[in-house]
Image: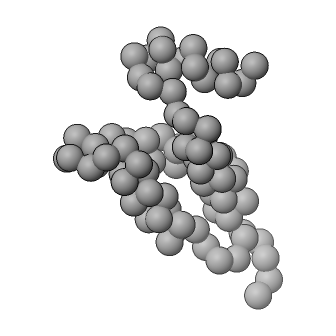
Amino acid sequence: MTDEWIQRLAERLDLEAPSQEETSRLLAAARDVAHGVERRVTPLSTFLLGRAVQARVAGGASGDQALTEVLELLENEIPEEAPGEVP
């Protein structure tokens, strides 16, 4: 159901749906933000990730290269300790 819904949404937005690999990478990134930063900012972070990928592709990068770059940048921004953890 979820994959079908994403496929339909992508079609309605005139976009290509993410591959299974891209889906896995994006869901992992969203999980990392939710657990490492704050759950409520996860949708905003994924929106920004998408815009950053789009900008890199518009600048000539491949989709895979752009996604990899953006996810690496995100990874460097996730705190090593989850919010509320005592070191």
- Out of 55 and 7, give the one closest to the viewer: 7
Query: Residue 64: where, in percent of width, then height?
Result: 41, 48
Residue at the far bottom in the pictured view: 87
Please say which color scheme the image uses: one colour
Q: State the quadrant of the N terminus.
A: top right
- Residue 22 found in image quarter: top right
Give the residue at x 47% y 65%: 72
Apparent side of residue 19 relative to residue 54 in the rendered image (left or right) = right
Residue at the far left in the pictured view: 59
Query: Residue 80: where, in percent of width, then height?
Result: 65, 77
Give the residue at x 59% y 50%: 25
- Out of 38 and 4, give the one closest to the viewer: 4
Say if residue 48 shows up in the picture. no
Q: Is residue 86 above or below residue 41?
A: below
Q: State the quadrant of the C terminus.
A: bottom right
Say if residue 37 shows up in the picture. yes
Query: Residue 8: where, in percent of width, then height?
Result: 57, 14
Q: Is residue 66 above or below residue 79?
A: above
Tally the marks: 0
- Out of 21 and 13, give the one closest to the viewer: 21
Q: Is residue 74 above or below residue 49?
A: below
Query: Residue 29: where, in percent of width, then height?
Result: 60, 54
- Residue 86 found in image quarter: bottom right
Apparent side of residue 66 relative to residue 81 in the rendered image (left or right) = left
- Out of 82 and 16, give the one closest to the viewer: 16
